[in-house]
Image (spheres, rainbow, N blue to C red):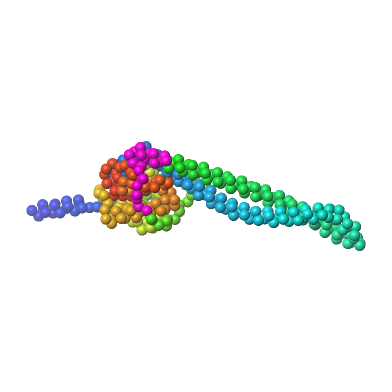
């Protein structure tokens, strides 16, 4: 009897063990979390959001450069006005007196030394007049170059806006083809508090590989995904999270995605409710507010997907809590 009781206790203890020694396997994650998202759809969303983000970054950089040019051109314009006034005054004086007046000044010299002094003064005046004219030409040329540069920046902005519009429409079309895509309400109002990830000089995002150890699994993630994960934690979102996942399509195997559980300790196979639902809403809203700083491709939460430029859209999962993303917030970064 005693042995049977001990055996029952041991079996209960083994079944209750939740902590596994060693690193979490790279396949850890909410089962079926990619359900309903085909490889084709994921590829289309990735391409569309990536194109939109890069175009948006280049647009912002072009606007910033234009603002700098406009500040410079105002200074150049003021300098050009002052030089034009100076050269015009010189031209009027020459017209009234003529260059021969300089000869009169020299002929009126009382002595050889006086003649040399007057000759030096005349030559200095001629150099000043010629220098002012040359400077006027140089500043005028600079002004023309700055005007042309502003035109180039405006053209670049128009190009990027057209790209953004196309990528937005491509993403929405892909979602509709998969059975979703209708505009819907979703969490908003988060604080833009994340430290921006590094960009290229033109405002786009540099390419990155899965080269950093994933602190949530035994897999790898990109430096930008690690940055986003760290910023999420700094913002106070500390519930269970799993990033890299072997196999399948999407960004998880590439180290560009993380699943943030609504539950504090694990992925629960049920819809998040109460405090867990409120946590997911706050996290999703925070990610949206910091999307431009973290290079967010898309966020999926509670059967909705957020895309840059499109906002919240209906998301068609597989009907399970994980597949419909009812129990976790999915984040993909560029």
Residues 93 and 76: in front is: 93
Farthest-out residue, right: 111
Q: Residue at x 62, y 52 (%)?
A: 73
Residues drawn in magenta? 169-188
298 relative to 116, above or below? above
Q: Quadrant of residue 79?
A: bottom right
Q: Quadrant of residue 253?
A: top left
Residues 248 and 274: in front is: 274
Farthest-out residue, left: 1
Residue 331 seen in render: yes
Q: How far across and how far down the image is residue 279, in percent? A: 31, 55
Q: How far across and how far down the image is residue 13, in percent? A: 19, 53
Q: How far across and how far down the image is residue 23, in percent? A: 32, 50
Q: Residue at x 57, y 53 (%)?
A: 68
244 is within the stretch colored magenta: no
Residue 131 seen in render: no
Q: Residue at x 63, y 47 (%)?
A: 145
Q: Residue at x 62, y 54 (%)?
A: 74
Q: How far across and how far down the image is residue 21, in percent? A: 28, 52
176 is within the stretch colored magenta: yes
- The mark tally for this picture is 0
Q: Is residue 148 left or right of residue 57?
A: right
Q: Is residue 138 left or right of residue 72?
A: right
Residues 168 and 211: in front is: 168
């Amino acid at each position: 009897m005693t042995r049977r009781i001990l055996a029952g206790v041991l079996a209960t203890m083994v079944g209750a063990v939740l902590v596994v020694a060693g690193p979490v396997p790279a396949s850890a994650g909410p089962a079926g979390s990619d359900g309903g998202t085909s490889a084709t759809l994921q590829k289309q969303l990735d391409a569309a959001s990536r194109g939109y983000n890069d175009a948006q970054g280049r647009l912002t950089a072009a606007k910033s450069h234009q603002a700098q040019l406009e500040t410079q051109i105002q200074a150049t314009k003021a300098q050009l006005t002052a030089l034009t006034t100076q050269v015009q005054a010189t031209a009027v004086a020459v017209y009234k007196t003529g260059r021969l007046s300089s000869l009169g000044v020299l002929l009126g010299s009382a002595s050889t030394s006086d003649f040399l002094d007057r000759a030096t003064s005349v030559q200095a005046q001629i150099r000043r007049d010629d220098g002012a004219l040359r400077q006027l030409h140089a500043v005028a040329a600079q002004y023309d170059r700055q005007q042309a540069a502003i035109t180039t920046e405006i053209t670049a902005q128009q190009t990027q806006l057209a790209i953004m519009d196309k990528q937005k429409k491509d993403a929405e079309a892909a979602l509709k083809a998969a059975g979703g895509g209708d505009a819907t309400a979703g969490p908003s109002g988060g604080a833009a508090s994340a430290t921006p990830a590094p960009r290229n000089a033109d405002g786009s995002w540099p390419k990155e590989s899965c080269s950093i150890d994933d602190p949530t699994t035994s897999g790898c993630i990109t430096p930008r995904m690690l940055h986003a994960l760290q910023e999420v934690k700094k913002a106070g979102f500390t519930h269970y999270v799993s990033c890299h996942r072997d196999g399948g399509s999407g960004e998880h195997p590439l180290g560009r995605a993380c699943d943030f559980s609504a539950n504090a300790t694990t992925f629960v196979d049920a819809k998040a409710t109460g405090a867990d639902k409120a946590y997911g809403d706050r996290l999703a809203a925070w990610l949206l507010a910091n999307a431009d700083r973290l290079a967010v491709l898309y966020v999926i939460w509670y059967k909705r997907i957020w895309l840059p430029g499109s906002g919240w859209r209906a998301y068609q999962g597989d009907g399970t809590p994980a597949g419909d993303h009812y129990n976790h917030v999915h984040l993909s970064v560029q």
